[in-house]
Image (cartoon, helix red, strand yellow):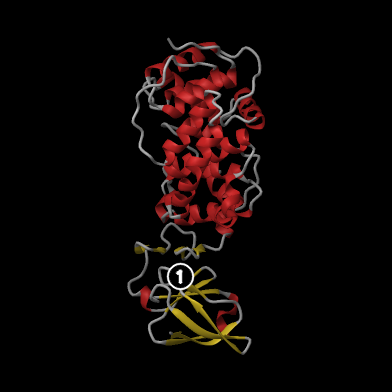
Amino acid sequence: MFCSVVLSAPRPFHLLLTPRRLHRLKLDAQRQTPRWMDLAHRLKTVSDSPQRGFELALYSVVTGDPKSGKEAVQWAAAHPCDLRQDALVRDWLGGSPDAAPACKPEPDIEHARDRLFQAIAKGQEDAEAVYKAEWKPMLAKLEGGAFRDPRALYAAVEFIDAVRINLHMDPRQDDRTFFGQLPIEFLLSLKPEQVEHPGWRAHAAALALVTLDPNLPASQFLQGWAMENRQMVRTGPGVAYEFLWADPYLPGIGYQNLDPWVYDPRGRLFARKNWSAKACWIEISAKGVEEQNCPAGWRAKPAAFGRLMLIPMDPKCLTVTPALKDHAAIIWHLPPGQKLRFKINGKRDTAHADNIGLWRVVNDARGKVCLTR
């Protein structure tokens, strides 16, 4: 039998609901904000929601309503293999099952998050062991491009959030550079129509990602995009996530002021001409070149993407001119790992293209850049 102890007094939570976050949500409920009203409406009208346990539990914790809390516990008991929602219901409302269900989850980022949530919600001492077992593979997947999948990115953010709250460690320290530009890289990885009309999962992932470090300049650009009124999720399963993560009190900067390109030396470039809905957008990665809205023949000549100049290396040498001084420059169409020679401050130097044939021109490089052995 699945038992429940509905909250009658404040108690500490271990998953997602920090004191500051819960305080904001309670204020939203008191003020009857649109996001709160959307969640309340969904609870009344969509009884078969796939996120029903999460929605009911969140509503109960914010309002102290025992009826919705009881329904959340009942939903979790009827869906024991939804490990994330089961863990949230148990952590927030105190329910616990008699035995672990025989579930067969996939070994992906969402499963890693679910394993950690379960360990924390059950009060198991092996939460740190789960973190150590799951984090390195998760990080490798994210660095390899899995962040482009909103489901994976969102699960990773919840994983990191739970580690920071409960284990008092910040996994992002293992790759500060990657996480420092991840909010921008995620935004620029979105194709033009996705920037204008993102799916609810992409929007939830963006809102959650901002909360990991709201003061990070990259986060503030993403916040500026995610908090636009036209982006607000008003219906569907994303409503509860919108209510949980959208924080209008966090700093934001208009994303239109962001220079529209980002390069990861591991072998990934996202760029767009500008922020219009019809802008030319490109991705260059190990998969090749993907483009949208770009003119025919653009790959054969230098192309500007904001303050980035993308230059094809067709001959054996090309000349880097002083006109590029106000731009970043990346040379492409190179063999992966190709050795290059150039001059900087009048002295010869060498460098290598990355693993997909891109080389970001170093500052003050002038004159010819040539292929060499």
Amino acid carrying mark 1 in the image: Asp
Please indicate, yes or no, whether residue 234 appears anywhere in the rendered image: no
Residue closest to the eye, 24 or 332 = 332
Residue closest to the eye, 15 or 195 = 15
In the rendered image, which residue does mark 1 sit on?
354
Q: Is residue 117 left or right of residue 316?
A: right
* Picture quadrant where residue 207 is located: top right
Residue closest to the eye, 4 or 138 = 138
Residue displayed at 35% across by 70% down:
295
Using the image, determine if residue 191 lies above or below residue 83. below
For the C terminus, the quadrant is bottom left
Q: Give residue 339's position: percent from left, percent from top.
A: 45, 80
Q: Give residue 79's position: percent from left, percent from top.
A: 38, 21
Residue displayed at 59% across by 28% down:
14
For the N terminus, the quadrant is top left
Using the image, determine if residue 214 lies above or below residue 314. above
Q: Give residue 119's position: percent from left, percent from top.
A: 51, 28
Q: Secondary structure at mark 1?
A: loop
